[in-house]
Image: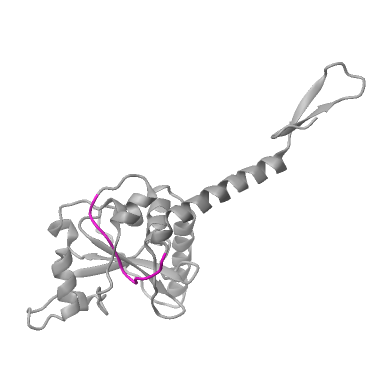
Amino acid sequence: DFCWFGRTVCSAGSSGGCSTMTNYSKWDKFAADLASDTEGEEEQQLVDYTKKSARYIHIPARDFPNEKEALCKLLEEDDEFEPPSSGAAGIPTDDSETPAGLQRALTKYGWKSIGSQFIPGYGVNSNGDDLWRVFFDDCFLTTQTVANPGARALLGNASLGSFVVACFDRKSGSDKLISKKEVADLIMRRQQGADGERIDLEQKEQAKRMQMFEELGAQTVDLKPNSS
């Protein structure tokens, strides 16, 4: 006798002595089909946000419901954003000498200077070719006041003011086109703690490289403040 999640097995000669054994293969298939249907429905619901049409996407400093479509609506493409070529290039000089792209970003987002960092788990020591990074006010702890929950989810620490996210393609050596849904997926995944393994692997790989440098005779500098 067969049921949806299990099957009834009776021993010969038993009178009503039947036991139910769970059919795990059927349950796994059901769960996989359910997950696939859910993902398919989500893809259809968010189809307007799946187009990869921008290299830079702005994460405003605003709260958002724990719902992916609402987050996608919050995100803003910024086709005119120009990332600085170096840390020094993100610091403005006199208005007459500040590059137009840098000045535009500073004015648009209310930044004092532009800093950047790779998202933990997606940096140069991580696996894969997609290296996700964010740009922000390099002095945001002193110049910005509004919390950015989306950026905090990505970085895992206090984040204030506007942030701009990009994905550097290791193969091409440039930022690639991305979609709002990709960014929303990344933020939601981080909120749920789903990237813990990636972060751990990246940290271990970085430790290996530091050990290799030390074995080659290079000196490492501890930038942490002295607690004594």
Position of residue 96 in the picture relative to residue 3 (left or right): left
Residue 78 placement: quadrant: bottom left
Colour scheme in use:
one colour
Q: Is residue 10 left or right of residue 176?
A: right
Question: Is residue 66 located in the magenta-colored stretch of the structure?
Answer: no
Give the residues in magenta: 51-62
- In depth, the one of 60 and 199 nearer the eye is 60
Say above or below: 4 vs 16.
below
Q: How far from the left and from the top, in percent, is residue 3? A: 73, 32
Pick whichever, 35 or 125, lies toward us: 35
**Image quarter of residue 5:** top right
The residue at 36%/61% (across/down) is 180
The vertical placement of 194 against 123, above or below, is above
Residue at 67% in and 46% down: 29
The rendered magenta stretch, by its main secondary structure, is classed as loop
Expressed as whole percent of the image width and height from the top left, the position of residue 226 reads 25, 57
Report whether residue 177 is seen: yes
